[in-house]
């Protein structure tokens, strides 16, 4: 299955950052009922802008009413705004011809007024039209002109131009250039504080990281985009982010989660009636079923996606569906229809200039020829694919092509060529040439050498038989005695050479056995030393982890507090601390570092040092941001710190979080448990992340519980997870007891759940009970 078929059918439609807010739309419609004449025009324009993505048909209706009034009350600026927003509403309904029609109208207004910003909008619309038709050079030419005309570099048009350039580069297989354009667009969006635009651009950046196999960066970008879109109630954007996250899970072979995200996205597309997006999600679901070898189910989804895309005349997406259906037929051993579908896909992709897609389809064609026993045709297709892939610079595609060429040459017993492509395959799979890869190649080399020697022996034996046959035919006369003697001598030499070759083969096998024995001894010694080193490292890390904890738990006048941490066999990075202030407030810290061993311990040490300086800052958000900034500058690669901050003063509690499980608050007067979210990116991740602070008032008998994810994500002997939903239920049963007894209850629940299974991660609790 070609994963680019999944990635490239995810669309983040439209440039506009407008997101329909129900309250805003209702207010505007109320105002519209109260005004008349020219006063209706700005209200209609604003309604069209708000609804262009969520309710495009309504946006078109309001735009048409505004344009009709503008004929009676001319206003060129409003007319351009209305035409621009109406165009994107048409685009949301896949009515692509309207892009060029409205671009022409805006260009006429630009000529009449001499306003370059109107001309820039017209060029943007035309570029999107040509991109949709696969005429990429036409689109780039118009975007270059737009950049030249757009003198002000920080207006809302600049990031739209940059994102469109990135999208075209992506379709041309120019991944690095595409990512650079989207990152430039994000910088401008941040300067403009355009949150919806930031979410859209993060989605583009996530897709590019996905294509380049940077899955951690891709997932981080899509999750940030999803959070922003949920806050903005951007249903279309939420569905796009859900789809993108599903793609990442699919590539990580987490198929159940992938299908869950796709299904959630499809429900949104169905509700909004957006066919192109429905088709994209159906295609993605088909890919998951294909990976699970549920081929008939996958083919049903691909056919449904193809039917929709074909009705929309979307050539780019149609070629994806054709290629996917061809792959299914190949899996089923139906090579003739498989080849027909792939050749149709290739014609489409070549017609629209899709180099990456063409390379991928040629690789699929090579595989079909190989399975049909047509090595020459397979080799031609694979080499054509390699030439295109080298231009796009995609490591994942290059890896697959070299693997196919390796398979073809190996089947033809051309071992030198096979070994060359095997090396290229390993290089593409892992850019660092390590000893493990070297040993694999060496072993394969030795295997091929042995095969060549065996072939040489067989050839010599065949030659010997031929010589024997001729010897029998020529025996008959004295005249042939000399020839016979020569043949006998030649036969003797052949036997001698065959015997030497057999001895050499035997010697090679003995050498290989000795090398394997030495290698096994070396590996055994290495692992023994490594185990001893890791044991010492874990013990040192555990001592470091425990030494960083406070020696005693403070007991303020208004609350009783208890804390507990239980470490796992492999040391993690849980951490808690208390910082009393002169104003009789107490700041409580609960942290959970990623990773294990001394790396996590080092991150905890750095965090504690920073908090010693920052914990008494007035604002908890400031503490999180400055701590994150400090850790980021220390350059802990791929290490992050999840954290909860709680400040207690009298009967007021302030909370702020950075990716830690929600705090549980038991209200004594209602006897109910509330969950207080502590969402946010972990520290040392995204710079200047907008963390949130929550303030609550508590009464006598209220209880607050903080915990790391060690207990809710604890796995028992059956592979089942303890689960976050159990946490508030346990607190309901013991909230009226002391903090120490509350923590004891959770420890007992963990012990029962494990039932002797080793603990996988640290778990830490801080419980406090409000006094009178």
Image: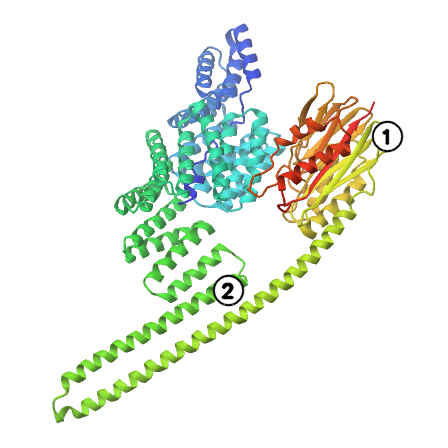
| Residue that sits furthest to the left in the current view | 477
- Real-space CA distance between mark 1 and mark 2, rounded to the nearest whole angstrom: 63 Å
**Residue at the disc numbered 2:** 438
Q: Nearer the viewer, residue 587 or 39?
A: 587
Q: Position of residue 83 (x, y in %)?
A: 46, 21
Tell me if 156 is positioned left or right of 644 in this view. left
Q: Nearer the viewer, residue 536 or 248?
A: 536
Q: Position of residue 442 (x, y in %)?
A: 47, 67
Q: Looking at the image, which residue is at 28% across and 86% down?
A: 492
Q: Position of residue 143 (x, y in %)?
A: 47, 36
What kind of element bears circle 2?
Answer: helix
Q: How many marks?
A: 2
Q: Is residue 393 visible to the viewer in this orientation of the structure? A: no
- The answer to whether 154 is drawn above or below residue 383 in the figure is above
Q: Quadrant of the C terminus?
A: top right
Tell me if 378 is positioned left or right of 202 in this view. left
Tell me if 625 is positioned left or right of 726 in this view. right
Bin the neighbour count of mark 2 within 10 Å (Cα to Cα): few under 14, some 14-19, many 20 and up: few
- The answer to whether 480 is drawn above or below residue 722 in the figure is below
Tell me if 540 is positioned left or right of 369 in this view. right
Q: Quadrant of the N terminus?
A: top left
Q: Looking at the image, which residue is at 40% across and 39% down?
A: 289
| Residue that sits furthest to the bottom in the current view | 478
* Numbered mark located on residue 584 in the image: 1
Q: Nearer the viewer, residue 653 or 139?
A: 653
Marks 1 and 2 in Cβ contact (< 8 Å): no
What kind of element bears circle 1?
Answer: loop
* Numbered mark located on residue 318 in the image: none
- The answer to whether 287 is drawn above or below residue 411 in the figure is above
Q: Position of residue 363 (x, y in %)?
A: 36, 50
Q: Earlier in the sequence, mark 1 or mark 2?
A: 2
Q: Is residue 10 visible to the viewer in this orientation of the structure? A: yes
């Amino acid at each position: 299955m070609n994963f680019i078929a999944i990635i490239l059918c995810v669309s983040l439609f439209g440039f506009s950052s407008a997101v329909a807010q129900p309250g805003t739309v209702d207010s505007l419609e109320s105002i519209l009922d109260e005004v008349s004449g020219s006063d209706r025009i700005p209200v209609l324009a604003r309604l069209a802008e708000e609804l262009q993505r969520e309710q495009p048909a309504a946006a078109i209706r309001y735009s048409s009413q505004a344009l009709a009034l503008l004929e009676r009350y001319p206003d060129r600026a409003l007319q351009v705004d209305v035409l621009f927003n109406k165009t994107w509403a048409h685009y949301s309904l896949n009515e692509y011809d309207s892009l060029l029609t409205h671009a022409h109208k805006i260009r006429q207004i630009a000529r009449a007024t001499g306003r370059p910003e109107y001309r820039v909008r017209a060029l943007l619309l035309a570029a999107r039209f040509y991109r949709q038709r696969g005429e990429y050079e036409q689109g780039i030419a118009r975007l270059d002109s737009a950049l030249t005309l757009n003198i002000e570099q920080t207006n809302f048009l600049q990031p739209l131009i940059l994102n469109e350039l990135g999208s075209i580069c992506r379709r041309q297989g120019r991944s690095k250039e595409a990512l650079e354009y989207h990152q430039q667009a994000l910088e401008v969006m941040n300067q403009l504080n355009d949150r919806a635009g930031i979410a859209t651009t993060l989605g583009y950046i996530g897709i590019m990281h996905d294509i380049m196999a940077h899955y951690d960066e891709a997932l981080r970008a899509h999750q940030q985009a999803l959070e922003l879109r949920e806050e903005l109630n951007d249903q279309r954007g939420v569905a796009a982010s859900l789809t993108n996250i599903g793609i990442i899970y699919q590539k990580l072979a987490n198929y159940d989660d992938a299908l869950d995200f796709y299904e959630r996205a499809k429900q949104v597309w169905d509700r909004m009636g957006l066919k192109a997006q429905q088709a994209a999600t159906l295609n993605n679901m088909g890919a998951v079923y294909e990976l699970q070898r549920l081929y008939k189910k996958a083919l049903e989804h691909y056919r449904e996606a193809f039917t929709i895309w074909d009705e929309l005349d979307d050539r780019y997406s149609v070629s994806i569906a054709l290629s996917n259906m061809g792959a299914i037929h190949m899996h089923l051993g139906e090579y003739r229809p498989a080849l027909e579908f792939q050749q149709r896909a290739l014609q489409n992709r070549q017609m629209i200039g899709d180099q990456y897609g063409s390379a991928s389809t040629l690789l699929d064609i090579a595989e079909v020829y190989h399975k049909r026993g047509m090595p020459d045709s397979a080799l031609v297709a694979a080499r054509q694919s390699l030439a295109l892939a080298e231009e796009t610079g995609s490591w994942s595609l290059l890896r697959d092509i070299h693997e196919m060429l390796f398979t073809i040459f190996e089947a033809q017993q051309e071992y030198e060529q096979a070994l060359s492509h095997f090396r290229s395959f390993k290089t593409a799979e892992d850019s660092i040439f390590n000893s493990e890869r070297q040993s694999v190649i060496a072993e394969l080399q030795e295997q091929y050498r042995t095969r060549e020697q065996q072939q040489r022996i067989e050839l010599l034996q065949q030659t010997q038989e031929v010589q024997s046959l001729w010897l029998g035919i020529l025996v008959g006369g004295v005249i042939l005695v000399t020839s016979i003697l020569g043949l006998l001598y030649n036969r003797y030499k052949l036997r001698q050479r065959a015997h030497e070759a057999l001895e050499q083969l035997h010697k090679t096998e003995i050498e290989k056995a000795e090398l394997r024995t030495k290698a096994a001894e070396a590996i055994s010694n290495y692992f023994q030393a490594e185990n001893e080193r890791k044991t010492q490292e874990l013990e040192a890390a555990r001592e470091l982890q425990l030494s960083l904890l406070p020696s005693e738990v403070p007991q303020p006048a208004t609350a009783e507090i208890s804390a507990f941490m239980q470490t796992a066999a492999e040391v993690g990075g849980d951490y808690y601390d208390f910082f009393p202030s002169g104003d009789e407030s107490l700041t409580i810290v609960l942290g959970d570092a990623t990773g294990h061993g001394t790396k996590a311990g080092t991150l905890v040490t750095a965090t504690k040092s920073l908090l010693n300086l920052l914990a008494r800052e007035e604002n908890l958000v400031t503490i999180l941001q400055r701590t994150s900034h400090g850790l980021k500058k220390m350059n802990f690669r791929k290490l992050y710190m999840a954290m909860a901050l709680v400040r207690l003063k009298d009967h007021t509690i302030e909370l702020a979080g950075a990716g830690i499980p929600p705090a549980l608050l038991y209200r004594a007067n209602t006897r109910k448990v509330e969950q207080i979210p502590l969402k946010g990116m972990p520290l040392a991740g995204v710079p200047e992340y907008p963390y949130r602070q929550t303030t609550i008032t508590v009464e006598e008998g209220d209880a607050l519980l903080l915990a790391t994810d060690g207990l809710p994500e604890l796995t028992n002997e059956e592979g089942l997870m303890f689960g976050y939903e159990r946490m508030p239920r346990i607190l309901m049963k013991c909230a009226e007891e002391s903090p120490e007894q509350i923590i004891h209850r959770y420890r007992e629940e963990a012990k029962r759940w494990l039932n002797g299974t080793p603990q996988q991660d640290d778990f830490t609790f801080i419980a406090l009970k409000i006094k009178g």
